Image: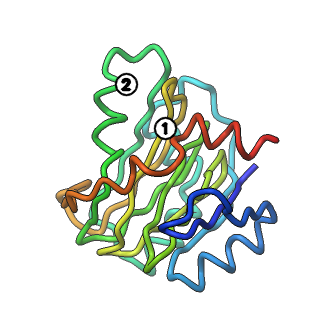
Amino acid sequence: MTTLSIYDENNHTQPRHYRDFSEIASLLGDAGVLLERWEANQPLPDNAAQEEVLNAYKESIDKLNLKYGFQSMDVVALTPDNPKREEFRNMFLAEHIHKDFEIRFFVDGRGLFYLHLDDKVYMILCEKGDLISVPANTTHWFDMGKAPDFKAIRLFTTNEGWVAEFTGSDIASRFPDFDEYLEQVSD
């Protein structure tokens, strides 16, 4: 279930949790973050190739593309048996920004976005069907857990694709990681 938890930057013990998708989308929208839910226009096998995945969501992608003018897009997938899973996970765990806004759509699986906005940390558990757009220059990080299992469409308004500028902050280490967060919100 899509979940939002809002923490005070200096108090990690009493977050506010939200589970209603409309309420989450509204709260994130107030912060300039787009959260939508998409459905495929055709069934997809687990081993669907990039073109199959993009075609299944073509209508939704085209609608968003009219507004933003994407220069590139791809499909990334990571499974628990990937030998580079720890390397990939660590790459996203440090707080960073992008000059471009970041759009991710979860075709399968789930991941946890952390947005550092003013004196708050917003933790958004995105699952299959969720699209999230993180505004340009927003400090954030992402965790996929120790056993990542997701497939996502990434959309970029630049040809360079994913380019991060790391802040050097250790803030990510002060908040629950993906696996700890799942334990907390499943209670």
Residue 144 spot, x, y in % from top left: 49, 38
Amino acid found under the numbered disc labelled 2: Arg
Amino acid found under the numbered disc labelled 1: Met
Residue most extreme to the bottom: 30
Residue depicted at 57% across the width and 58% down the height? 12
Residue that badge 1 annotates:
144
Q: Residues within 10 Å of mark 1 (few under 14, many from 20)?
A: many
Image marks 1 and 2: residues in contact by CB distance under 8 Å:
yes
- Tell me the element at label 1: loop
Residue 21 spot, x, y in % from top left: 76, 65
Q: Residues within 10 Å of mark 2 (few under 14, many from 20)?
A: some
Residue depicted at 46% across the width and 31% down the height? 49
Reply above or below: 41 against 167. above
Q: Nearer the viewer, residue 180 or 157?
A: 180
Q: Nearer the viewer, residue 125 or 77?
A: 125
Reply above or below: 23 against 14. below
